[in-house]
Amino acid sequence: MRSKSKKPDTLLTHAGRSPEANFGVVNPPVYHASTILHPTVAALEAAQKNRYNQVTYGRWGTPTTFAFEDAVAAVQGGYRAIAFCSGAAACYAALLAFVEQGDHVLLPDSVYGPVRGFAGGFLRRFGVEATFYDPLIGAGIADLMRERTRILYLESPGSHTFEVQDVPALVACAKARGIATLIDNTWAAPLFFKPLALGVDAEIISATKYIVGHSDAMMGVVVCGEASFARVRETASLLGNHAAPDDCYLALRGLRTAGVRMRAHEAQALALARWLAQRPEVERVLHPALPSCPGHEFWRRDFAGASGLFSIVLKRDIPKPAVDAMLDGMELFGIGASWGGFESLILPGHPERLRSARPWQDGAVVRLHAGLEDQGDLIADLERGFARLNAAR
Ligand SMILES: Cc1ncc(COP(=O)(O)O)c(C=O)c1O
């Protein structure tokens, strides 16, 4: 298929498929493999030299892995994609691919918590220093760049607080200094934002979220431009990274319906966010598609839609036990990590425990994932939650 001329929904449906090579079977089959047999030593050696393009050894990918990687690369407009066993593994490998001892990296203050820990803790042990910047800094990022800055890491919108970043302005500053840009695009992938088209070097997606879409498998993927592919691919191999073929299959199957699911999550989240914005207990709604969200203007400019994850900030005088009372009794909103599945979720966020560039001084943050349930049922569940909150105040 000539992917460049096709629209996103067509790519989601067709990319990475080859029924003609599989007896007409619509979905690529699951190939389980460690050993791959070669007819001669010469064939083995040729395959090893070409290991990222052909099936050579299970750890470097089976036909199922390659089908998933090809599909995501086509959908995101990348040169190649690399599958990982989790989104976190994808984040860490992408960071490691670009640094050596003595280097410096820049990450947004709103970065996913475990990535903050990896950069500020693990990388530090190997002599790489991390600075956390205000996610809304824009072109001001130039002032934080040093001689040894190697990576400008972005995550837009940010975890829990949803600041939308000015990606073109940040990329321009990094390019002027030859600094690599990486972005965690999990929130909007695979439908609503294509950062490689704006010059980002590599895009990281936790496929665990909307790509798998059913809360039953963990996967990550890094989508690379041509210049960054070899580095990330080699780093993934050196780390012994391997994405299981069953999970690649589930992720590829999820990708086929991600378009309709994401639009349904979008509509549901917007309806809930607007309803929540009217509640007297809510100080602010942090949803990128609403003007109350920091960086909303960049969402309007750069994104084609919004997914199902957003937060509310509660009034400052609402104490923790009242927030807990609300969350504890929810019937349809589950309390649990991750998001992007078909079900609604609710979780307390704690930016006050992490932020350093812009300390969090507002009220309690509650993150919601809008699932595919009936809207009236979800609102009734939230309404009962607010009643519990007010009774415990
Ligand atoms: C923004 C973001 N990036 C990365 C990850 C890590 O993905 P995984 O849970 O697949 O390791 C998460 C997980 O919640 C996330 O929210």
Image: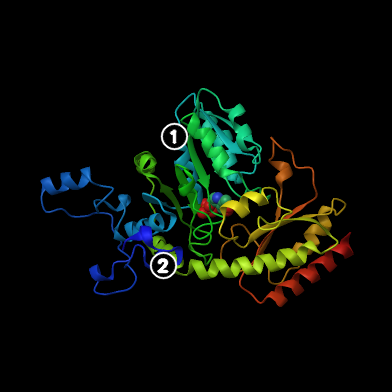
Q: Which residue is mark 2?
A: 10
95 shown above or below 319:
above
Secondary element under disc 1, as helix, strand or loop, is loop
In this view, the residue in front, 282 or 113, is 282
Check disc 1: other Cα within 10 Å, few if <14, some if 14-19, many if 20+. some
Residue sitting at 16 percent across and 45 percent down? 46
Residue 54: x percent and y percent? 24, 52
Is 146 in front, or is 350?
146
- The residue singled out by tag 1 in the image is 98
Image coordinates of residue 161 in percent, x first then y, are 68, 49
Seen in the image, is 313 located left or right of residue 354?
A: right
Q: Can residue 342 be spotted in the picture? A: no
Q: Nearer the viewer, residue 143 or 356?
A: 143
Res 270 seen here: yes
- At label 1, the amino acid type is Phe
Residue 60: x, y in percent?
Answer: 31, 50
- The picture places residue 27, in percent across and down from the top left corner, at 34, 70
Q: Amino acid at mark 2?
A: Thr
Q: Which residue appears at 69% of the width and 39% of the height?
A: 355
